[in-house]
Each structure stands twice: as structure tokens, then as C-alpha cells.
Image (cartoon, helix red, strand yellow):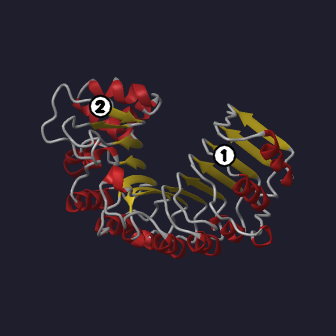
Amino acid sequence: LAFSDELLLRVLAYLPEPHLTASASLVCKRWMRLSGRLRRRLAVRDWAFVTHRLPYRFPDLAVLDLFPASIAAPAAPSRASPVLTCGAVSLTLDPGADPPLGACRFLADDVLDRGLAVVAARFPNLRRLSATAASESAGLMDIAGGCATLQELELHRCTDLALRPVSAFAHLQILRIVAASSPLYGTSEDGGVTDIGLTILAHGCKRLVKLELVGCEGSYDGIAAVGRCCAMLEELTIAEHRMDGGWLAALAFCGNLKTLRLQGCARIDDDPGPAEHLGACLTLESLQLHRCQLRDRHALHALFLVCEGARELLVQNCWGLEDDMFALAGLCSIPKLIDQSLQWSNA
């Protein structure tokens, strides 16, 4: 008790994160308050905690994940209701819904905006934020104005309009976009991220180094806009895309791209076009394919042509490859082939 707060903070700082939160914070109220000052990253699961207790309990956060807290719980869950868990997010399902999974229900936009306004006002040194995009995006504008040092942003349930505030983030270097989809988020058919949203993103985030697009639509125009405007882009991840045919040719505009990663893509490109119009990513160092369907020989041939300068090829948990199709990898000047859990299937 005779120790000053400064001295006790120096002692507690030597504790690893699990012991700091699970043991030291339970000793007394004073230790709980001091250990909260040392906490740098947090995933919140109750939105009421964001607006009432978060700034006082953890005043010096640098990494904050608000996505689990933005999912609304069922009105009257029963003990028999099943729980679906994916990563750090758990959803209580409604057995009486049709279909049983139903749509993922989120808090109202005004509630989300109020919480983001609190975060913007009380956490000026925030470096990484994961949140749910609201349709009006007033909360994101508050974040852009209050968190000037924010470098990494992850947005869920994104639409074209929700991406309008990204131009206000002056120092944003890493961006992950999870597009809104009708079956999961209950949005209208015209929701999601299209060429319009990709163009807004490209003109607003010219200092991006890493970009991940999950479930996005679009075509040649959207990817070309990203390549032309984001001159510093070094790593591009495209997951579960729903893009129109011909988008592969736009990768040639990414003049500084070093890593291209495709994840969970049921198709590569339905119509990549003539080989002479594809171009190439001459600066590419690594091509990574994870859980992709590679049955389309024409699309795979076009992908390897665009990535002909790659020096590393990673194929992990992919389906549909045959010997002659896999031989197309010879189009790339690849000295190193990494084959992890490669699955061959002709079904």
C-alpha cells in the first residue's frame, strides 16, 4: 500500500498479459485500475460497456475490437438455443426462424455511432480498430477526427456508402473490408461493395500498404482504380470475391505489389480475356492460394501469366488441380514452391 501508483505500474508492467488481466486485476480495486492502464488491446462483447465503462477501465488502449459487441443478442434466448461460434464471435441462433440461422442482427446505426463517438473522444492514440460500418458513417467520421494516429482499420458489413469516410483517415496503412451480404447481414440486394466503393476507397486511401477485400463485388474498373491510386500497395488479399469477369487484367496497374493472396475463392475469373491484354505484375514476389477452386484451366493460366514475376508460390488446401494444370505454374519464374496440405480432386 505504501507504493506509489508509478512504482506499482512499473512492477505490474513485467507481468505477461494473461496474468495481468486474470490475476493481478482481481487483487483489489486499485490494482484493477492500474492494470487497466497497462492494457493495450481489447475485444469488447457488450456495447453498453463501450459507452459507460470502457474509457475509465482501459484508458490507454491501442488496439480495439468492437465487432463482437455490435451484434445484437436475441430478444429472449432460451437455454436450448444453439450457439454458432466463428473465431472470437459467437451468435445465439433462433430455432424458430426460417431459415433457422436467420440474418445476423446488429445494433441500430445511431447506437453504433454514439459508441464510436465515445471511442474517438477518449482514445486519441488508437492504432488499430475493428468495427461495424453504419449506413450514415457519422461514427467513422468522429474516429477519423479524434484518432489521428489510426493506422489499421477493419470494417464489417460494408457497403459503398459506408466507405465514404475513409478519405478522412490521413495515416491509414492497413485496411480490411468485409462486404455486407444479403444472407448473413440481412441487407438489400444492392448492398455490398462494388466498383463504386472500390473507387471511393482508392481515391481516399492513397497511403495503403496492405488491403484485404472479403466478399466484394466489382470488376476491372474497381481493381484498376485501386492499382492506379494506391501506389504504395504492397500486399493485396482477395477473399470469397464475387467479381465480374476480366478483373485479373487490372492487377497489372498495381505497380508496387509484392504479395497477392486469394482465399476461399470458388472461382478465379470467369472471363479473363485474351492473354495479350492481361499484363503482368512485375514486382510480385509471392502468389498465395488458400482454399480456392482451381478447376478452370483458362482462369488459372491467366492468373499465372499476370503473376509471371512471382518467385514464390504457396498452394494450400486447394481443389481441382490436375497434373497438366499444375504444370502451368511453369509460366512463372518460381524458384520456390511451397506445397502445404495440397488436395487433389477431380470431383
The circle drawn on residue 83 is: 2
The front one of 143 and 166 is 166
> Which residue corresponds to the image point at 85% horizontal and 54% vertical from the top-left?
331
> Which residue corresponds to the image point at 49% horizontal and 63% vertical from the top-left?
217
Image quarter where the C terminus lies is top right
Q: x and y percent of residue 106 in the render? A: 26, 51
The front one of 228 and 103 is 103
Question: Vertically, is 72 above or below 1?
Answer: below
Tags 2 and 1 in contact by the CB under 8 Å rule?
no
Q: Amino acid at mark 1?
A: Leu
Secondary element under disc 2, as helix, strand or loop, is strand
Q: x and y percent of residue 144 in the render? A: 39, 67
Q: Amino acid at mark 2?
A: Val
Instruction: Please tell me in which quadrant of the rendered image residue 318 appears.
Output: top right
> Which residue corresponds to the image point at 87% horizontal and 45% vertical from the top-left?
335
User: Horizontally, is 76 left or right of 310 in the view?
Assistant: left
Label 1 CA crowd tier, 10 Å (few <14, some 14–19, many 20+)? some
Q: x and y percent of residue 31 in the render? A: 29, 31
Question: Vertically, is 123 above or below 327?
Answer: below
Secondary element under disc 1, as helix, strand or loop, is strand
Instruction: Please tell me in which quadrant of the rendered image residue 248 appears.
Output: bottom right
Question: Vertically, is 265 above or below 2?
Answer: below
User: Horizontally, is 212 left or right of 48 in the view?
Assistant: right
Q: What is the CA distance from the residue labelled 2 to the residue labelled 1?
A: 31 Å
Label 2 CA crowd tier, 10 Å (few <14, some 14–19, many 20+)? few
Q: x and y percent of residue 289 in the render? A: 66, 46
Kindly give the residue lying farthest to the front in the view shown.
Answer: 347
Answer yes or no: is residue 188 visible.
yes
The circle drawn on residue 289 is: 1
Answer yes or no: is residue 61 visible.
no
